[in-house]
Amino acid sequence: MTVLHQFPEKLAVLRLAAGADVPEWAESSSLFSITASATETSLVCAGRSVPTKVPGDRGLIGFTVADPGASSTAGVLVELLTPLAEDGVTVHTITTFSTVWVLVSSTDLERATEAWRRRGFTVEPAPPA
């Protein structure tokens, strides 16, 4: 049985200009990520201080696999995302060295957790850091 940890704060995935610096309002949370390409800089941060004019998705809830070793298992993303795709839940995914993150809109939270539970996952609050 796979256990997923649900993190309490709302996150935002934002699109900044290519080469943008990290803005002063960007706040760290359970997940803070900067990814840059030639055409954009993406920022994942706490959603509480993000100016409304910044394009992106807000109100996202983060989930991780409780066992960090499972994140390196072949097929882990397919296992996590298939039930959500079947239920029409849109996600953002991020992987760190040892953790797979799935970000789900708070408006789809119930559908996502139900889809995972139907597939045998357990969803529980993330332990305090």
Image: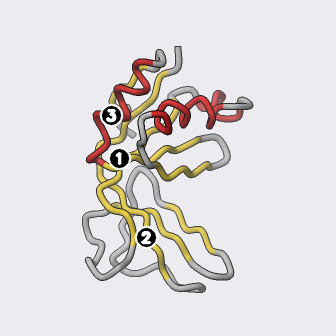
Q: Residues within 10 Å of mark 2 (few under 14, many from 20)?
A: some
In screen coordinates, is 123 left or right of 51? right
Total marks in image: 3
Q: Position of residue 126 (x, y in %)?
A: 37, 33
Task: Tell me the residue that label 2 is attached to.
Answer: 14
Which circle's residue, 2 or 3, is located before the other in the chain? Answer: 2
Residue 91's label in the rendered image is none
Q: CA distance from mark 1 to mark 2?
A: 14 Å
Name which residue type carries label 1.
Ile
Q: Quadrant of residue 46?
A: bottom left
Q: Secondary structure at mark 3?
A: helix
Q: Position of residue 92 (x, y in %)?
A: 49, 53
Q: Secondary structure at mark 2?
A: strand
Q: Nearer the viewer, residue 86 or 31?
A: 86
* Depicted 100 relative to depicted 28: above or below: above
Circle 1/circle 2 CB separation < 8 Å: no
Which circle's residue, 3 or 1, is located before the other in the chain? Answer: 1
Q: Nearer the viewer, residue 88 or 101?
A: 88
The residue depicted at 42 percent of the width and 35 percent of the height is 87
Q: Position of residue 5 (x, y in %)?
A: 42, 32
Q: CA distance from mark 2 to mark 3?
A: 24 Å
Q: Residues within 10 Å of mark 1 (few under 14, many from 20)?
A: many
Q: Residues within 10 Å of mark 3 (few under 14, many from 20)?
A: some
Q: Quadrant of residue 45?
A: bottom left
Name which residue type carries label 3.
Arg
The residue depicted at 70 percent of the width and 34 percent of the height is 72
Name which residue type carries label 2.
Leu
Residue 111's label in the rendered image is 3
The residue depicted at 28 percent of the width and 34 percent of the height is 110
Task: Tell me the residue that label 1 is attached to.
Answer: 61
Q: CA distance from mark 3 to mark 1?
A: 13 Å
